[in-house]
Structures are given as structure tokens and as C-alpha cells.
Amino acid sequence: MSQIATTKRRSLRRRTYIWMLSTLAVASALIYWEQTALLYAISTLAMCILLFMVAFANIEGGELETNQPAEADDASIHESNVMAGAPSPDIAAPRKTTRRKGAA
């Protein structure tokens, strides 16, 4: 690993520890001075921000591959059904339809 990557990692780790300790200090101070309503509001906002960050994050790290044709997927499903012994949709028994009395 290069020197730059190691330095960057240490910097991020240090920044993370500072954020954790400062958050712990603020939460402890709010509990000590009995400001739990304010702590509740702050924690609710923090959770909303975290959920938005996760929702808009690029978790997969790339675009979804949607360029594959649908026929290939249908064919692979059909092949797996045949191998599993399931009847194919072409051979499946037709449904019986019944008419109600008085229906046109």
C-alpha cells in the first residue's frame, strides 16, 4: 500500500474518532443537564440524515446491468424448470372456465 493511502486512512480514522468522541460528549452533556427532549430531537434528525445518506448511496458501486434481453432470462428459467421436473407452461393443463347463469 502506498504512503499516501496509509496517510489518508489514518486521517479518516482520526476524524472518525473525533466525531465519535464529540457526539458522546454532547449526548452525555444533554443527559447530565436533563435535556432529553433536545437529545431526542437531535437523534431523530441524525437518523433521518443517515437514512437519506443510505438511500442515495451507490451501494453496488456501479450501474445495474439491464442490457440483457428478457428472452434469455425466460429461456434460462424454462431450462431450470425442465431440469427440476416442473411442467413447462406450454404443456400445462388448460384451465376450466365456467359460466355463471344469466351471464352473456
Image: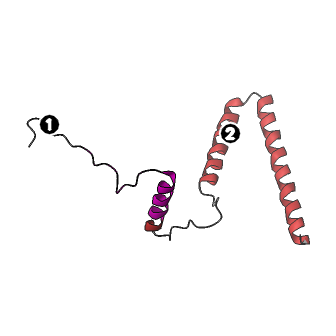
Report, in whole angstroms, how far the alpha carbon at label 2 lies from the one at label 1.
60 Å
Residue designated by label 1: 100
Residue 58, how many percent across, how many down? Answer: 63, 61
Mark 1 residue type: Arg
Residue drawn at x 27%, y 45% is 95
Q: Mark 2–mark 1 contact, CB under 8 Å? A: no
Residue drawn at x 34%, y 57% is 90
Q: Which colour scheme is used?
A: secondary structure
Residue 36, how many percent across, how many down? Answer: 71, 30
Q: Quadrant of residue 100?
A: top left
Q: Magenta stretch containing residue 95, yes or no?
A: yes
Above or below, 24 relative to 93? above
Mark 2 residue type: Ser
Residue designated by label 2: 43
Q: Nearer the viewer, residue 90 or 17?
A: 90
Which region shows up in magenta? Answer: 73-96
